[in-house]
Image: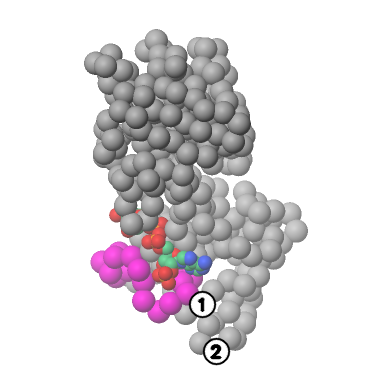
Amino acid sequence: MYDLMIIGAGTAGLSAAIYAARAGLSTLVFEGAMYGGQIIVSPTVENYPGIGCISGADFANNLYAQAEQLGVQFAFESVVSAENHNDKKVVKTANAVYEGKALILATGAKNRPLGIAGEERLTGRGISYCATCDGSFFQGKTVAVMGGGNTALEDAEVLSKLCSKVYLIHRRSEFRGESSQVERLKKLPNVEFILDTTIVELHGDTALSSVTLEHLPTQKREQLELDGLFVAIGQIPQNAAFTDLVATDSYGYISAQEDCRTNIAGIYAAGDGRTKTVRQLVTAAADGAVAALAAAEYIRAL
Ligand code: NAP
């Protein structure tokens, strides 16, 4: 039996593994795909305190190497389910059953894609899903934000301080996000709303150059030249396997506060998959530390 099992080898899961190993816990990390999580596709990370500039891939490689050197074990298998048996937690993959004293859920969230041809190819080449992370690459440029929730509204404001022009494109005429934020945006001279409109085509060979917009009520189409497009149409938490195990909110995020404790003793949630307001690399790493140290305390008291 392991002391601690961690599901997910993104920034939160790997940070938890490092803290757990340093606290003397035998630790097993499950990862269904490649370690590293969302950050692995970021060409440049410039907002992690103490690290001036690093590629997402190097950041993830460093985390993985550090965990491995500390003796953390990895099972590169997709988790099918996890169960709580009071003092014992059980994780099932397609091939095996594993047991541990405590469990950290760190499977994160995926940005909801537009689902338009060329999106994957142009991601990191004009298309971004994080204004806070990538906005500074578009200083003085023309960009658009797609979405009508609080994230899109916040992104438009962040970008208005950096970019010469910001279009806010939303598929309805009413915003889902807070009206006070909408009113603030209306006062910004370089922000323009394009409502009742969606993006139907992306253009650009090596980088995004323009998009085709469709005005939904009239189906009229027009081309909009852009240097950057920030997609902010919500996230999809990767918690489907755990909804019977721990409490989640109406969006599917695991209900846990800053102490990362779920409603089940000995099970913690760390990173973008838990309820929180700031989803950044540094908050994912912080969650990993908090959850691992809480798990160590829980295990000591068993
Ligand atoms: P969200 O509230 O779910 O909003 C997603 C937006 O994207 C909606 O306006 C939706 O349009 C649009 N959308 C969804 N699918 C689309 C598609 N396929 N094509 C075009 N548009 C699409 O997501 P979020 O803004 O990321 O916020 C998530 C949660 O975090 C919310 O509870 C939000 O309040 C919270 N949050 C809070 C803060 C804060 O308090 N400071 C900041 C950011 C986020 P419709 O409106 O037409 O459905």
Question: Relative to 166, is 4 above or below?
Answer: above
Residue drawn at the location 62% of the way across and 72% of the way down? 200
Residue 175 covered by magenta stretch: yes
Magenta stretch, residue numbers? 166-183
Residue drawn at the location 60% of the way across and 60% of the way down? 227
Quick one: label 1 or label 2, which is nearer the N terminus? 1
Residue drawn at the location 57% of the way across and 28% of the way down? 96
Question: Which amino acid, mark 1?
Answer: Thr
According to the picture, the residue beneath numbered tag 1 turns out to be 197
Q: Quadrant of the C terminus?
A: top left
Q: Residues within 10 Å of mark 2 (few under 14, many from 20)?
A: few
Ligand 1 closer than 8 Å to label 1 CB: no
Residue 278 in the image, given as x and y percentages of width and height = 35, 45
161 or 181: nearer the viewer? 181
Question: Relative to 271, is 179 above or below?
Answer: below
Label 1 – label 2 distance at C-alpha: 10 Å
Q: Quadrant of residue 119?
A: bottom right
Q: Quadrant of the N terminus?
A: top left
Ligand 1 closer than 8 Å to label 2 CB: no
According to the picture, the residue beneath numbered tag 2 turns out to be 218
Q: Are marks 1 and 2 in contact (CB under 8 Å)?
A: no
Question: Which amino acid, mark 2?
Answer: Thr
Residue drawn at the location 36% of the way across and 41% of the way down? 245
78 or 40: nearer the viewer? 78
Question: Relative to 247, is 25 above or below?
Answer: above
45 or 30: nearer the viewer? 30
Residue 60 lies left or right of residue 23; in this view the side is right
Residue 173 covered by magenta stretch: yes
Label 1: which secondary element: strand
